[in-house]
Image (cartoon, helix red, strand yellow):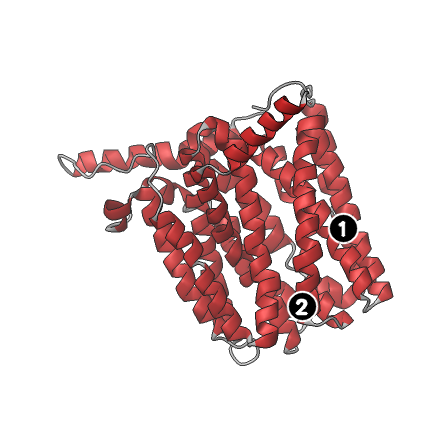
Amino acid sequence: MDTSAWKTAVSDTLTLYFRRRVLVVLLLGFSSGLPLLLSFSTLSTWMREVGVDLTTIGLFGLVGLPYTLKFVWAPAMDRLPLPPLTRLLGRRRGWMVATQLALIVTLLGLGTTNPLSSPWLMALFGVLVAFFSASQDIVIDAYRIETLEETEQGAGAAAYVLGYRVGILAAGAGALLLADSLGWFQAYAVMAGLMLVGLVTILLSSEPVVAGDAIAPAASGPADAAGKVVRWLREAVVAPFAEFLRRPWALLILLFILLYKLGDAFLGAMTNPFYIDVGFTKTEIAEVTKVFGLVALLAGLLIGGAMVRRLGLMWALLICGVLQAASNLVFAAQAVIGNDVGMLIVTIGVENATGGMGTAAFIAYLSRLTNVAFTATQYALLSSFMAFGRTVLASPSGWAAENLGWVEFFIASTVIAVPGLLLLLVLMRLFPPKAVSEKPA
């Protein structure tokens, strides 16, 4: 490629990423990623700091169950109006504003609780934050797909992941820095304020031209109204799940989705308590995560996306999955070495890079599985299975860490990742990878 052609390609790429619709998705990705850590990972640091035992912290991961169950109410949010916000803003924007306002309130409430004196109240607010966060994700996924043109979908997905990860960084490193200098309530208050980024963005944006139909309000009588409800339930609730389950080896695919990132989730539930136990300060954790973690994460996302393009989706999933699992062993080395900031840089860098690679490939895989006729509901179903591993199956991680010790725990988290990789090999035999030259579906 000559210099002028290369410059044109770079210019076209930059122009694509700076389109208004793509930038809106970037900011909504930030709003989507922000609440995730605040309902558990950052919360676990707070709990460990005041002396809550690891088993309890691990079980606290169950507050994330709404991320696992969001497919249950996704059809309603996908199709039904929300008076009066739907009339004022449109269905997608109305639901999004409602969930974002609820997140601001519940994040403030979570910040007022105390892990020792009011653990049940903290758990309640944690569940509410997770519920409204999962609900927001349902609407944002639908909004992203419906507003972007076909040529913008790839850039939009990349922008969403980037915004999501920056939101996670703000809720992780940012919240820890604020908690270290101001206190935990102030940290959560600032995080609640950051939800205004998504709220302002959606208020200044337009409603998608095409969205799912709501139940028509007009009906000639009770029988006609009942028929409309039954028809809506069949089309909005039953059809998306039935279509997926009719596919060959659908249950095996769901099992793979459940297991692929399980080792990563098992590890992730205990990383912050581990850092505290080793003796790192919240500021040290935040600074290393902010500088090296973000750079490594962005590098991992870029590498993972390039591998999907170069090697094909299934081979990229396999290689990224192996590296993602092997990176857990770096934590075992950190546990042996102890309080060493240099080693912490290596540990967080490796974990974020390989995690970013696995995430890029996995999101591409989930997107390919989704039928465009049922985008929001099917994506909620698939991501719910992924979240099930992160919440329910990873909930005994605290018990395992407490009873095994840190080195053995991290080795165990690597072993836990193996079944998902073996299942991937089975799927690659059942569905041989397409040639790299083929365009993704």
Instruction: Determine the image quadrant of residue 420.
Output: top right
Instruction: State the separation of the CA atoms marked 1 and 2.
Output: 27 Å
In front: label 1 or label 2: 1
Vertical arrangement, residue 307 with respect to residue 170, above or below: above
Pointer 2 local density, CA inside 10 Å: few below 14, some 14–19, many at least 20:
some
Which residue shows up at 40% across the image and 35% down it? 147
Give the image location of residue 293, x and y in percent: 69, 54
Query: Mark 1 falls on what kind of element?
Result: helix
As rendered, which of 362 and 222 lies closer to the eye? 362
Q: Are marks 1 and 2 in contact (CB under 8 Å)?
A: no
Which residue shows up at 39% across the image and 54% down it? 199
- Residue that carries the numbered disc 2 in the rendered image: 55
Q: Quadrant of the N terminus?
A: top right
Give the image location of residue 6, x and y in percent: 64, 25
Instruction: Determine the image quadrant of residue 403.
Output: bottom right
Is residue 113 found left or right of 252 in the rendered image?
Answer: left
Q: Could you tell me if residue 392 is visible in this image?
A: yes
Give the image location of residue 54, x and y in percent: 68, 69
Is residue 127 found left or right of 8 in the rendered image?
Answer: left
As rendered, which of 96 and 241 lies closer to the eye? 96
- Residue that carries the numbered disc 1 in the rendered image: 350
Which residue shows up at 74% across the image and 45% down it? 324
Q: Which amino acid does label 1 sit on?
A: Val
Q: What residue type is labelled 2?
A: Thr
Which residue shows up at 62% across the image and 49% down it? 389
Q: Could you tell me if residue 262 is visible in this image?
A: no
Give the image location of residue 162, x and y in percent: 57, 46
